[in-house]
Amino acid sequence: MTDLETRAAPARAGALRRAAPALAGYAAVRALGLLALFLWSGARDKNAYTLLTARWEALWYVRVAELGYGYEVRLANGDVHSNLAFFPLLPWLERLVAAVSPLSYADGGFLVSLLASLAAAWGVFAVADLVYGRRAGVCAVLLWAVLPVGIVQSMAYSESLFTALAAWSLYAVLTGRWVTAGALALLAGLTRPVGLAVVAAVWAAAVTSFVRDGSAAGPHGARSATRACAPPGSGTRTRRVVGMLLAPLGTAGYVLWVGHHTGKGPLGYLDVQAGWRNGFDGGYAFGRFVAEKFTSFPSALAGVGLILGVASVVWLYVVGVRQRQPLPLLVYTGLVTALALCASSYFGSKPRLLMPAFPLLLPLASALAGQRMRRSALVLGAVGVASAVYGAFWLNGSGPP
């Protein structure tokens, strides 16, 4: 396993206190983003809360929560947009909130997203703190908060919920809590299709641990002299197996249910996604999209920006590999990035599809943590203001599809 030297996990009683600066900074950034959105929307006679809770995917999630699955829209070109494309955990939580409170399904989605974004920020901090240290953890959370599409973290979308489950599953893997890691991976798999990346991270770490256990013993089962500690006992191995078995149940369960529901078998979910013109083509369609930008001068600037953006993502991943990030982080980040960049889905969605790939930010967070605090604060503050303004502009325009 590729590993930076991970630090000991803080005691449970002190974990929140340790994360408090990161969470306070995250809340401040998100409050700034919401303030900018409400001011901008008010100036344009738009309802900012409606923009956060009742547009695009948020409407589809509310419809699932209210009416269940089976709703679809048939377009003039023959495409079929079915709500089976949307995984069920967020609508289930929206329904739960509506059942135990006077809030509507849309209100429930906003509340779940709000709480999940804080849980995600804490999870990002926990992972970064464990691998790079506390200051890097704070910087990682703030960098995640000030992403240009960070306003999505406050929308009734599933990105915040998924990132929270993924981050804490990865933290559980890194700290040897296998059953917890598997259970959280199961829930992540009920949230978004990219839950497969969390499953792969759990399995990669578990398989590597089993290999290490085997190499720790010499001939006839004698303990290797190079191993400082004895291999984990049978109880640990059992928990590891349980975690591995739990991890894929969410994704597999929903995909198989969709196949049964549609009568198209195990691959029925792929047909549902095809109705939305979503698929995995290795990046061919995205490459053509970028190439077409260079057919005229104004759009060529956007093409250059897209190339630089993709190159930056790849470079950050390579830096993570060179810094020997733990294997679960590399597996998870690699799959999230590949699925985002190599899918033939709507290209405007790619920035927010990359949002759960928070380990990409860890090398930047580590570098920022090494700077003087005043300089780091100025950089993050300036980027936070720019992100807030851009988010307000974006959501009042075409916004996140």
Image (cartoon, grey):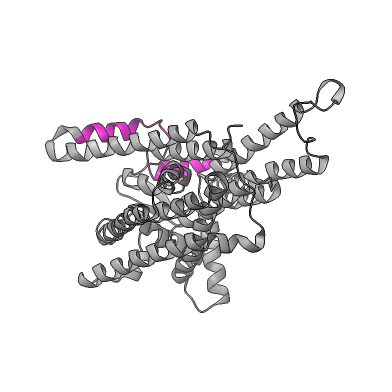
Left or right? Give the position of 102 relative to 297.
right
Residue most extreme to the top? 219
Which segment did they paint magenta? 268-293
Asked whether the viewer can see residue 87, the reply is: no
Q: Position of residue 63 (x, y in %)?
A: 45, 63
**Quadrant in which the N terminus appears:** top right
Can you say whether 308 is above or below 120 in the image? above
Residue most extreme to the right? 220
Left or right? Give the position of 106 relative to 201.
left
Asked whether the viewer can see residue 115, the reply is: yes
Q: Position of residue 400 (x, y in %)?
A: 33, 54
**Residue 278's image quarter?**
top left
- Give yes or no for residue 203 being in the magenta stretch: no
Residue most extreme to the bottom? 102
Can you say whether 147 is above or below 342 in the image? below
Q: Which residue occupies the foreground of this view, 147 or 154?
A: 147
Left or right? Give the position of 285 relative to 181.
left
Q: Which residue occupies the foreground of this view, 269 or 386?
A: 386
Q: Main secondary structure of the magenta part?
A: helix
Q: Which residue occupies the foreground of this view, 309 or 366?
A: 366
> What residue is shown at x 40% (from left), y 52% (from top)?
143
**Residue 347's image quarter?**
top left
All told, the count of numbered labels is 0
Q: Position of residue 363 (x, y in %)?
A: 44, 41
Q: Which residue occupies the foreground of this view, 160 or 281?
A: 160
Residue most extreme to the left? 297
Q: Position of residue 205 (x, y in %)?
A: 64, 37
Left or right? Give the position of 17 relative to 341.
right
> What residue is shown at x 77% (from left), y 43% (from top)?
236
- Give yes or no for residue 288 being in the magenta stretch: yes
